Structures are given as C-alpha cells and as structure tokens.
Image (tube, rainbow, N blue to C red):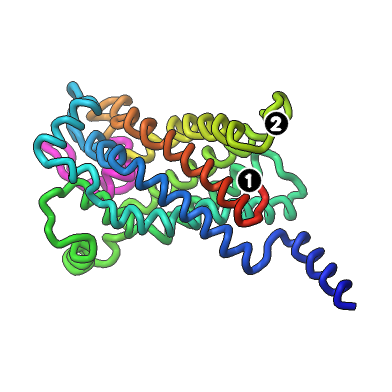
Amino acid sequence: MRELETAINHEEREKWGFSASDVVYHFGTSGISVAAATGVTHPLDVLKVRLQMQLIGQRGPLTGMGRLFVQLVKSEGPRSLYLGLTPAFMRSVLYGGLRLGLYEPSKYVCKMAFESSNVLVKIASGAFSGAIATALTNPAEVLKVRLQMNPNLRRGAIGELRRIASDEGITALWKGVGPAMTRAAALTASQLATYDESKRILMRLTLLEEGFYLHLISSTIAGTMSTLVTAPMDLIKTRLMLQRESKTVGPYKNGFHCAYQVMRTEGPRGLYKGGFAIFARLSPQTMITLILYEKLRQLAGLKAV
C-alpha cells in the first residue's frame, strides 16, 4: 500500500513538474548563478552606465570603453568599478531568482494550455518571467544606477535608499519601470528562448549532448542575440532612472519620449551608446549564468533547461 502511495505521489509530481523542494531549488539555483555572474561582470556594468550618460541631447565623438576605463580608474580609483555592488547583488538574487526561476514553470503552464512547446511559447514564457521579476525588483536597480553615477556618496546603499524615498517619494524607486519591464521581457525572452532553441537545434544537428560544450555554445549565441535586442531599451531605462537634464533636453516624460529625444538630438546611433560595453558585459554574464545554472540544477537533481 505504501509503495502504491509513493508511486502515485511520484506520478503526481511528474505530472505537475515540481514539488515544494523543487520550487526552492528553481529559485535558489537561478539566484546564485546570476549573483555569481554579476560579481564577475559588475565593472563592465559601471562602464556601460557611464557610457550611456555621455553627451545627453548632443551629437559628437564619444569616449570609448577603454579610454573611459582608464579615466575612471585615474580620477575615481579602482573602487569606482564596484560602485553599486551591494544593490546589484541584492537585485541579482531577487531578480535573477525570479527571472530564471519562473521560466520553466511558465513554459510548463503554456505547454499545458496550448499543448505546444514551440519557440513562441518559449518567448512568451521568457517575456512574462522577465517582466514580473523587474516589476518587483525595480527599486534595487534604481539604487544601483544612482550609486554608479555618484562616486562621492558616503551614505551607502541604505542611506541613499532613505534619501530617495524621503526627498523624491517612494514612487521614485519605480522610475523607469516601464522600459525596465520591456527590456527585461525582451532580454529574458531573447536570452532563454534563444538558449533553449539553440540547445535543441545543436543536439539535433550535431553530435553535441547535454553538457559543458553544448551549454557554452548555446549561451554564447543567446548572449549575442539578447545584446542586439535589448541595447536601446537598456539605454532608455538608464536615462529614465537617472533623469539627468542636459542643455537641450529636459526630463523625459516616459520611455517613448526618451527614445524620440535620443533619436532627434543624438541620432539613431545614440540608442546604442554603450552597446559594446553591454555586449562585453551581457555576453560573458549570460555564459556564466547559464553554464552555472545548468550545473547547479544538475546537482540539485533538476532537469536541464
């Protein structure tokens, strides 16, 4: 009788795809993997934000990533490359845990609802998980970019959080949430759907099997695709969160207004300011995150993505 009950419970678990412990493992493995990747690539994130804030509302030659790196270290010291690291880690665990952790359950629900697991289902699952994760963790992102652009702050992350809430209101912590959700939806959809599909195609067309080399190649493809899709959205999100005024452009009203003003005053290339820094950060971050995520899932007894 006990064996029959165990078999039924196992069958129910297989039917629904997860148990209580699986939920912890899903979110725990994703949060840890994103946090590890964030620690490695955070200096590139600081450079990306500084590059995106160049010549606001103006056309002109831009400082490259290499020169900006040298200027930053000389003028502000090596520690400036880790400005905003505390909220970045906090956001990584929460946002990363939700963004990656919700993908598999979302895909499973879509598969049940539409009786399909094609690429459109994967894109929809990624978009949903990315948007929800960002809506919940936007304050940590606002705090991170504020600290990255203000090296002279001495109050720390908690002090700056209190200042924003008291001086600008609690809603200021959700500045740029619209573009941030759009970017996160596009990022997760392009990143995870591309990774998922790349693995499936590579396993079908080549001799690669589930393992490090398959994960490495698939994550490289996913990192490249997600950079191309999300670079303009990332710039708009950063501009809205900082809301720095220039000589010719006042505060942006919303994401569409920001995109229009950038196109009008800085040209189409303005939307890709910091694009190389985004690729230099996002590509290795995607690789580290997904390779580590797959390994942690294996150790936790979960199936591969």
Q: Does the magenta stretch include residue 250?
A: yes
Q: Is residue 31 left or right of residue 44?
A: right
Q: What amino acid type is highlighted by mark number 1? A: Val
**Residue closest to the eye, 278 or 29:** 29
- Could you tell which of marks 1 and 2 lies nearer the N-terminus? 2
Q: Quadrant of residue 257?
A: top left
- Magenta span: 236-261
Q: Residue furthest front?
A: 299
What residue is shown with label 2?
Answer: 203
Residue positioned 51% across, 59% down in the render: 28
Instruction: Give the class, few, some or many, for how many residues have Cα within 10 Å of label 2's Cα (few <14, many ≥20).
Output: some
Question: The C terminus lies in which quarter of the figure?
Answer: top right
Question: The N terminus lies in which quarter of the figure?
Answer: bottom right
Q: Position of residue 47 (x, y in %)?
A: 25, 37
Q: In which quarter of the image is residue 285?
A: top left
Residue 194, placed above or below residue 22: above
Q: Does the magenta stretch include residue 4?
A: no
Q: Can residue 194 be seen in this view?
A: no
Residue positioned 48% across, 37% down in the render: 287
Q: Which mark is residue 121?
A: none
What residue is shown with label 1?
Answer: 305
Q: Quadrant of residue 248?
A: top left
Q: Residue furthest top?
A: 61
Q: Can residue 299 be seen in this view?
A: yes
Q: Distance between the residues labelled 1 and 2?
A: 13 Å
**Residue closest to the eye, 274 or 81:** 81
Secondary structure of the residue carrying tag 1 is loop
Residue positioned 79% across, 70% down in the render: 9
Q: Where is residue 236 in the image (x, y as percent from the top left)?
A: 32, 41
